[in-house]
């Protein structure tokens, strides 16, 4: 029996916002009216240029300015408008918002954030476990809305992206600090009926054409019966030849 490849996948592109003048030294959180810096605008433009060859069925953003501005750069010249979804918004850091990282690193809670984030509830703010729950629920909803072969971009924040990646990899939230999401980086996850595949992580350069789903063949529209030998959910034993 000839193998057939089914295209029942949804591809999620996660982009972290570009730099602001607070990114790095300060925990910005839900700081209002925080636009991209000049360097951040250049990063957003570079991200838009990289993604230009890809069809995007939706562009979704955290409601915070730095994400909306980054997503807007990607949307420019496309017919797709930016949709806001608060579930992709930054973690509610509560009383930690706006404080220098150097100062926060001396707080007793800092060690818990590093070693046991699933137990963390920020004072006056949100639990990291709740952040993961809302973000993953949003991903599932957008996947269902866009359906098989959908490709969409979500512009969000570092801890939110790390939480989504941890879920896709089947990792406990306590392991999410092993994941990195730099400003304006691109992370790609392909969701199949059986499992998600992490295609790229913290990618800041290079061609993205391999993220486009393969073209549909006549067999793809046929019944999946008898396709148990090879489906889009199967991992490539030995690593495979890649998508290029």
Image: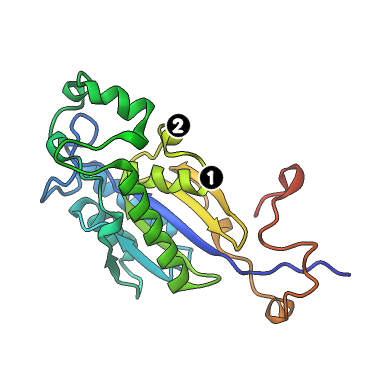
Quadrant of image for the C terminus:
bottom right
The percent coordinates of residue 118 (x first, y second) are 36, 37
The percent coordinates of residue 201 (x first, y second) are 48, 43
Query: Reading the chain from its start, which is encountered first: label 2 or label 1?
Result: 1
* Farthest residue, direction top: 106
Residue 50 appearing in the image: no
Q: Which residue is mark 2?
A: 178
* Farthest residue, direction front: 119
Task: Name the residue: 20% across, 40% down.
Answer: 93
> As rendered, which of 174 and 162 lies closer to the eye?
174
Crowding at mark 2 (Cα within 10 Å: few <14, some 14-19, many 20+): few
- Name the colour scheme: rainbow
Cα distance in 3D space between marks 2 and 1: 12 Å
Residue 151 appearing in the image: yes
Crowding at mark 1 (Cα within 10 Å: few <14, some 14-19, many 20+): some
> Looking at the rendering, which quadrant does residue 94 occupy?
top left
Look at the numbered disc 2 and give the secondary structure of its residue. helix
The percent coordinates of residue 130 (x first, y second) are 31, 48
Q: Do callouts 2 and 1 mark residues in contact (Cβ within 8 Å)?
A: no
Q: Which residue is mark 1?
A: 169
> As rendered, which of 142 and 82 lies closer to the eye?
142
Task: Name the residue: 31% across, 41% down.
Answer: 128
> Looking at the rendering, which quadrant does residue 135 occupy?
bottom left
Task: Name the residue: 33% across, 55% down.
Answer: 134
Horizontal side of residue 4 vs 180, given as left or right: right
Q: Is residue 131 above or below residue 211?
A: above
The percent coordinates of residue 75 (x first, y second) are 32, 65
* Farthest residue, direction right: 1
Look at the numbered disc 1 and give the secondary structure of its residue. loop
């Amino acid at each position: 029996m000839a193998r057939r490849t089914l295209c029942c996948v949804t591809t999620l592109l996660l982009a972290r916002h570009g730099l602001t003048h607070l990114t790095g030294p300060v925990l910005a959180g839900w700081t209002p009216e925080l636009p991209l810096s000049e360097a951040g605008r250049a990063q957003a433009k570079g991200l838009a240029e990289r993604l230009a060859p890809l069809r995007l069925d939706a562009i979704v953003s955290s409601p915070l300015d730095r994400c909306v501005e980054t997503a807007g750069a990607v949307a420019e010249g496309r017919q797709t408008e930016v949709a806001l979804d608060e579930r992709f918004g930054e973690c509610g850091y509560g009383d930690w918002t706006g404080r220098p990282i150097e100062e926060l690193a001396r707080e007793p809670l800092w060690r818990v954030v590093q070693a046991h984030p699933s137990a963390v509830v920020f004072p006056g703010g949100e639990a990291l476990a709740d952040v993961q729950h809302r973000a993953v629920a949003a991903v599932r909803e957008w996947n269902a809305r866009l359906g098989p072969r959908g490709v969409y971009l979500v512009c969000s924040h570092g801890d939110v992206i790390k939480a989504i990646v941890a879920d896709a990899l089947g990792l406990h939230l306590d392991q999410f600090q092993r994941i990195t999401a730099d400003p304006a980086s691109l992370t790609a996850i392909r969701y199949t009926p059986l499992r998600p595949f992490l295609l790229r992580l913290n990618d800041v350069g290079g061609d993205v054409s391999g993220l486009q789903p393969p073209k549909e063949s006549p067999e793809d529209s046929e019944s999946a019966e008898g396709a148990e030998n090879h489906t889009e959910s199967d991992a490539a034993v030995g690593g495979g030849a890649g998508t290029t």
